[in-house]
Image (cartoon, rainbow, N blue to C red):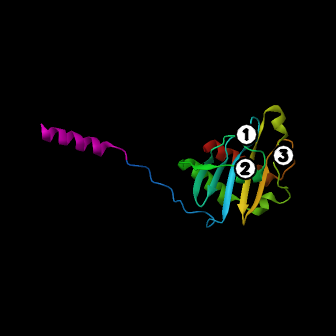
């Protein structure tokens, strides 16, 4: 009987699927740049997601405070375990180039909020300087900026 139980246990353990491989958690920029994304507008927009030192975080407060500085400094963040979210944030970070925001003044304008709409935002914190941008339907932007901000929206969907 004991041998039969042992055999059943071995069969069960062998049929278990292995744990998925974890992603490399090293920072894409040596930890000196922090990236945040989310939605602003509507009923507070939603949580902020942060990539810092190669780790993904989510704001505890589920409402965006309405500007880049308050989003960075006014939120408490908790670790978020989402392999797809981490990968999406890493892709955004690695795909961002300063030329994308050339000619787009930092700001959090979202006229859609008057009608309960939302605008995706992207924030960079580098050398204690906070810059953030939104994509509003009412703004005039370069194709590169629009394309990048659409990627921000896709990353938010993946998270």
Q: In terms of depth relative to the viewer, which is nearer, 142 or 40?
A: 40
Give the magenta range.
1-17
Question: Measuring 72% from the left and 64% from the top, which residue is drawn there?
Answer: 126
CB of mark 2 within 8 Å of CB of mark 3? no
Q: Which mark is residue 45?
A: 1
Q: Secondary structure at mark 1?
A: loop
Q: Position of residue 124 (x, y in %)?
A: 72, 58
Residue denoted by label 2: 71
Marks 2 and 3 sit apart, C-alpha to C-alpha, by 14 Å
Determine contact: label 1, label 3, CB under 8 Å.
no
| Horizontal and vertical percent position of residue 75 | 68, 49
Of mark 1 and mark 2, the one earlier in the sequence is 1
**80 within the magenta span:** no
Q: Quick check: is 11 in the magenta stretch?
A: yes
- Mark 3 residue crowding within 10 angstroms, few (<14) / some (14–19) / many (20+): some
Q: At which x and y percent is residue 113? A: 81, 37
Q: Which secondary structure lies at badge 3?
A: loop
- As helix, strand or loop, the secondary structure at mark 2 comes to helix
Q: Earlier in the sequence, mark 1 or mark 3?
A: 1
């Amino acid at each position: 009987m004991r041998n039969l139980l042992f055999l059943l246990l071995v069969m069960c353990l062998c049929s278990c699927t292995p744990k998925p491989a974890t992603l490399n958690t090293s920072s894409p920029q040596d930890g000196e740049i922090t990236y945040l994304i989310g939605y602003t507008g509507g009923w507070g927009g939603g949580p902020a997601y942060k990539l810092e030192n190669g780790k993904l975080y989510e704001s505890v407060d589920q409402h965006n405070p309405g500007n880049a500085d308050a989003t960075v400094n006014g939120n408490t963040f908790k670790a978020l375990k989402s392999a797809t979210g981490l990968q999406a944030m890493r892709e955004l970070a690695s795909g961002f180039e300063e030329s994308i925001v050339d000619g787009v003044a930092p700001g959090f304008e979202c006229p859609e909020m008057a009608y309960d709409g939302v605008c995706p935002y992207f924030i960079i914190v580098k050398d204690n300087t906070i810059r953030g941008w939104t994509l509003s339907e009412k703004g005039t932007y370069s194709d590169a900026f629009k394309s990048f901000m659409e990627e921000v929206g896709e990353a938010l969907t993946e998270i």
